[in-house]
Image: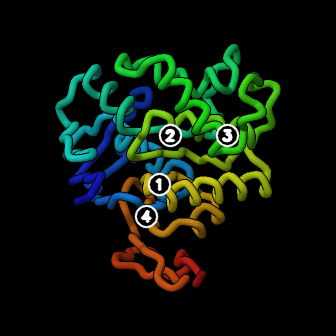
Amino acid sequence: MPIVQVEHVSKRFLLGDQLVQALEDVTLSIEPGVFLAIAGPSGSGKSTLLNIIGCIDTPSAGRVVIDGHDVSDRTPDQLADLRARTIGFIFQTFNLLPVLSAEENVEYPLLQMPELSKKERAERVRHYLGMVGLSKYADHRPNQLSGGQRQRVAIARALATHSKIVLADEPTANLDSKTGSSILKLMRDINRQSGTTFVFSTHDRKVMNMADRLVRIADGQITALGMKAEGRWVFVQDRRPRDEEDPEI
């Protein structure tokens, strides 16, 4: 059963006095445990689709089902609770609280879970900081960490809530090539070991190459759906011009 189902979703919004069609009749199923990239140029609708999957935004039309829950008619409070317990977020700007240490940033979303004791929270924080290799930096604030270390804190924070889905919006955009590659490898290793579903929005070729599923989007519509088989992309749907096709990988 898919962990995410997006059915005939459209999204429109006003930009000044102009109506913008960000998504148009998008249908997509995401299976549990995949490492999936949603790829497209700026303005293609990839971030809007990610925000709708993450229950940060709501569609103008269509239906969205997350982990078996139809979220189309949920109230903001209901969506907030689902986000807190099911979905983790990693942003290109890290979104860490500057006045908190690394361990306090990881613990922060756990404070919204009253069923967790202080000891349980501390155990989770210790476990996930260790998983991303930052145990020695637990008491460091974000301004004392490198960009790659801050992104690792963000990954630990996303996982600490035991999220089934981690959504990453351009996670390597503010990192140098070497650091970005190490962050991608870390996330793929976590995906393989834990079965956590990772979904990225990106225009970075390195992210696409590391994915095992690829969704191409342009002008608010899905133009291609691909999966990797024996190191090569196999597209089950492909409506792109020939000059936009992906090379063999």
Tell me the distance, in whole angstroms, between the alpha carbons under discs 4 and 3.
24 Å
42 above or below 222?
above
Q: Position of residue 104 (x, y in %)?
A: 62, 20
Which mark is drawn over residue 194? 1
Tell me the distance, in whole angstroms, between the alpha carbons under discs 2 and 3.
12 Å
Q: Position of residue 10 (x, y in %)?
A: 27, 46
> Looking at the image, is mark 3 or mark 1 nearer the viewer?
1
* Residue type marked 4: Val
Q: Position of residue 28 (x, y in %)?
A: 30, 59
Counting other residues with Cα less than 10 Å from the Cα at mark 1, is it few (<14), some (14-19), or many (20 or more)?
Answer: few
Residue 91's image quarter?
top right
Which mark is drawn over residue 215? 4
Q: Identify the residue at horizontal 48%, vertical 77% (top origin).
A: 228
Disc with the residue nearer the chain's start (3 vs 1): 3
242 above or below 210?
below
- 2 and 1 marks in contact (CB < 8 Å): yes
Residue at disc 1, secondary structure = helix
Q: Position of residue 157 (x, y in %)?
A: 55, 33
Tell me the distance, in whole angstroms, between the alpha carbons under discs 2 and 4.
24 Å
100 on left or right of 157: right
Disc with the residue nearer the chain's start (4 vs 3): 3
Counting other residues with Cα less than 10 Å from the Cα at mark 4, is it few (<14), some (14-19), or many (20 or more)?
Answer: many
Residue at disc 2, secondary structure = helix
131 on left or right of 69: right
Report the residue marked by disc 3.
151
* Residue type marked 1: Ser
Tell me the distance, in whole angstroms, between the alpha carbons under discs 2 and 1.
10 Å
Residue at disc 3, secondary structure = helix
> Looking at the image, is mark 2 or mark 3 nearer the viewer?
2
- 4 and 3 marks in contact (CB < 8 Å): no
Report the residue marked by disc 2.
159
Disc with the residue nearer the chain's start (2 vs 1): 2
